[in-house]
């Protein structure tokens, strides 16, 4: 019994020591969490509020999240209205640390201002900027500044890691552009379950059509679904994709009726679990692009 | 636009519209009579309570087996039946009234469901996983809806007399024992079955709407039970059809369109209904009745 208590004391001391060493950072969702980890390396311990395969649009924070947040020195969010629930959590937990909006100072687009006409949230800023690697480079620099001000003694370390990660993002962008270039321009059309790919589409010249509005909260209208089927039939779109965070039934129905087949699952707002195909941001983008390209070649 | 284009073209053009329509019709066939008996027994809020009681079962099935219609229906059915049987038995064994027991059991069921999902489910929006949209009804779901409607009508026919007597005079059958209790349980099981069918097609709350609104309206039009049944069924069927058209032409979400159409029918019945409608009261033609 006594030795057990002793063991606990040692373990507690060890874990205290470990966490005192590392900068405690909270990221709102899994994709941001990975980017923070890439920049922070082994000097940070990152906790993600909305985990893999979770939908950050509709997340309900738990008291545990408040506890995690209070213990953190830095909070990284996407911003652009993506995490609507976050302000309440920050207020409720009286978090006093530094807060960084990763998407700050990026060039934003509006939702549904793309070519299609059934987006329900026209005029709202599209928050899904991480789908464009070029914009994620800005995410990286914003996050690096946040880390540097929360932990000035390691600022040099963070900047160095940020530079090499930015290098990776350049390569990713180049690779993705080459992949998409392999598809004839008039075939670059796909149908997905929600408008999460506006930035990706603009960057690489792919047109995304979807039956719902900007987020997973909206319910589809019969007209929206009908128009999408008509368009898919007329333009011979065979590439239909479901996402890891939403109900695929409606898309299956659209696919059946438009004579298209489901081209696989895309990762839009969350990473997969560690054993899945998209455990980190770069892997996610590679997986999405390969899946999209394979699908578009069927068009 | 020609009347044909407005009233039928969407269904001619799209299979998903035809599926949705047939799904609504099948759902209406089962739900409308069930709703009417709930109204007659002053159990109108039971449907709502039971719809919540079903959720945990479906949610647990989703956690365990993923997005499988069969698993989620069976899960919902089991949760609903457990609540119905437990509440029913407690009611018969203790002093507490049935409505209090239903409230207690459904709340316990709902809370355990939320707990399980938050602890072991992913953060995917459960509303979207658990609730179908009528636009996504496929062939399997249609067969399921039709089977539930058929079962409902057959069982209601078998227990019709007992249900009618119990609706108007619960004491009478309870004093007779046996058969009345069976009819009562059979009926509660049908409520659960129809809600399970409904939540796959429309979402639980929407399914309750298609159950209760036509039934409440029907009471304002007819006096005899068969006539009330016909009116309730008629309103439910028309709401499904008109609601889908509104969703198509107005670019509005389908579930709420259907239920709001039924809601309009209810308000119209309140105003114009031959039996107790406001208009007839003002005109002084109200027949005095119990």
Image (cartoon, rainbow, N blue to C red):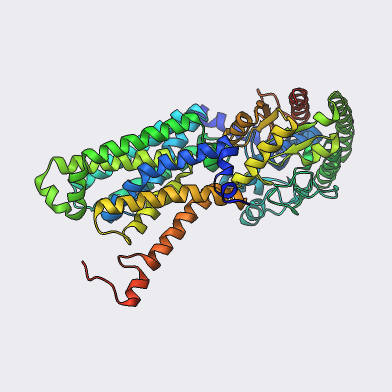
Q: Is residue A191 visible?
A: no
Q: Is residue B105 visible?
A: yes
User: Splitting the image into 4 quarters, where does residue B194 fall?
Assistant: top left
Q: Disc count in the image?
A: 0
Please name the residue shown 69% across and 35% down the image: A192
* B128 displayed left or right of A286: left
Q: Nearer the viewer, residue A146 or A61?
A: A61
* A38 displayed left or right of B138: right
Please name the residue shown 60% across and 51% down the image: B2
User: Splitting the image into 4 quarters, where does residue B80 fall?
Assistant: top left
Image position, residue B32 (x, y; %): 36, 48
Image position, residue B220 (x, y; %): 33, 62
Image position, residue A217 (x, y; %): 61, 47
Q: Quadrant of the C terminus of chain A?
A: top right
Please name the residue shown 73% across and 25% down the image: A295
Q: Nearer the viewer, residue A134 or A138?
A: A134
Q: Residue furthest left?
A: B176
Q: Nearer the viewer, residue A138 or A151?
A: A138
Image position, residue A201 (x, y; %): 80, 37
User: Splitting the image into 4 quarters, where does residue A239 fall?
Assistant: top right
Q: Nearer the viewer, residue B148 or B75?
A: B148
Q: Is residue B169 above or below residue A215?
A: below
């Amino acid at each position: 019994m006594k030795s057990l208590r002793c063991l606990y004391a040692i373990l507690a001391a060890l874990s205290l020591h470990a966490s005192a060493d590392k900068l405690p950072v909270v990221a709102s969702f899994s994709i941001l969490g990975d980017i923070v980890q890439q920049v922070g390396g082994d000097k940070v311990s990152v906790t993600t509020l909305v985990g893999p395969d979770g939908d950050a649009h509709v997340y309900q924070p738990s008291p545990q999240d408040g506890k995690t947040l209070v213990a953190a020195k830095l909070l990284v969010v996407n911003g652009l209205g993506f995490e609507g629930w976050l302000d309440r959590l920050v207020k409720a937990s009286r978090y006093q640390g530094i807060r960084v909006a990763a998407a700050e100072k990026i060039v934003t687009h509006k939702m549904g201002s793309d070519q299609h006409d059934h987006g329900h949230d026209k005029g709202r800023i599209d928050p899904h900027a991480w789908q464009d690697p070029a914009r994620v480079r800005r995410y990286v620099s914003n996050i690096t500044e946040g880390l540097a001000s929360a932990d000035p003694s390691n600022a040099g370390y963070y900047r160095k890691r940020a530079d090499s990660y930015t290098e990776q993002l350049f390569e990713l962008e180049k690779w993705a552009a080459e992949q998409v270039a392999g598809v004839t321009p008039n075939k670059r059309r796909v149908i997905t379950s929600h408008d999460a790919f506006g930035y990706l589409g603009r960057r690489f010249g792919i047109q995304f059509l979807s039956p719902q509005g900007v987020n997973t909260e909206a319910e589809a209208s019969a007209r929206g679904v009908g128009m999408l089927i008509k368009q898919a039939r007329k333009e011979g779109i065979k590439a239909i994709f479901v996402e890891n965070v939403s109900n695929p039934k409606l898309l299956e129905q659209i696919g059946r009726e438009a004579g298209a087949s489901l081209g696989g699952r895309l990762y839009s707002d969350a990473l997969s679990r560690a054993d899945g195909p998209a455990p980190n941001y770069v892997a996610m983008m590679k997986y999405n692009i390969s899946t999209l390209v394979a699908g578009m070649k069927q068009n | 636009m020609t009347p044909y284009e407005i009233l039928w073209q969407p269904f001619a053009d799209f299979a998903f519209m035809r599926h949705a329509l047939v799904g609504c019709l099948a759902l209406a066939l089962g739900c409308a009579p069930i709703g009417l008996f709930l109204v007659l027994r002053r159990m109108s809020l039971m449907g709502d309570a039971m719809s919540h009681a079903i959720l945990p079962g479906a949610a647990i099935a989703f956690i365990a087996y993923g997005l499988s219609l069969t698993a989620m229906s069976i899960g919902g059915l089991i949760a609903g039946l457990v609540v119905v049987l437990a509440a029913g038995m407690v009611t018969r064994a203790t002093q507490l009234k049935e409505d209090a027991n239903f409230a207690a059991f459904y709340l316990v069921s709902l809370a355990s469901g939320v707990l399980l999902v938050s602890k072991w489910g992913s953060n995917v929006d459960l509303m979207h996983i658990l609730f179908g949209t009528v636009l996504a009804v496929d062939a399997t779901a249609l067969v399921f809806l039709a089977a539930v409607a058929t079962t409902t009508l057959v069982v209601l026919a078998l227990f019709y007399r007992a249900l009618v007597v119990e609706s108007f005079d619960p004491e009478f059958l309870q004093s007779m024992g046996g058969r009345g209790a069976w009819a009562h349980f059979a009926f509660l099981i049908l409520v659960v079955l129809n809600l399970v069918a409904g939540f796959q097609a429309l979402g639980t709350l929407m399914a309750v709407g298609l159950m209760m609104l036509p039934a409440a309206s029907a009471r304002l039009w007819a006096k005899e039970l068969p006539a009330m049944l016909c009116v309730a069924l008629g309103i439910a069927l028309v709401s499904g059809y008109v609601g889908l058209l509104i969703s198509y032409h107005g670019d509005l979400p389908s579930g709420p369109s259907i239920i709001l159409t039924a809601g309009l029918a209810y308000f119209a019945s309140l105003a114009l209904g031959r039996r107790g409608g406001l208009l007839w009261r003002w005109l002084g033609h109200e027949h005095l009745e119990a």
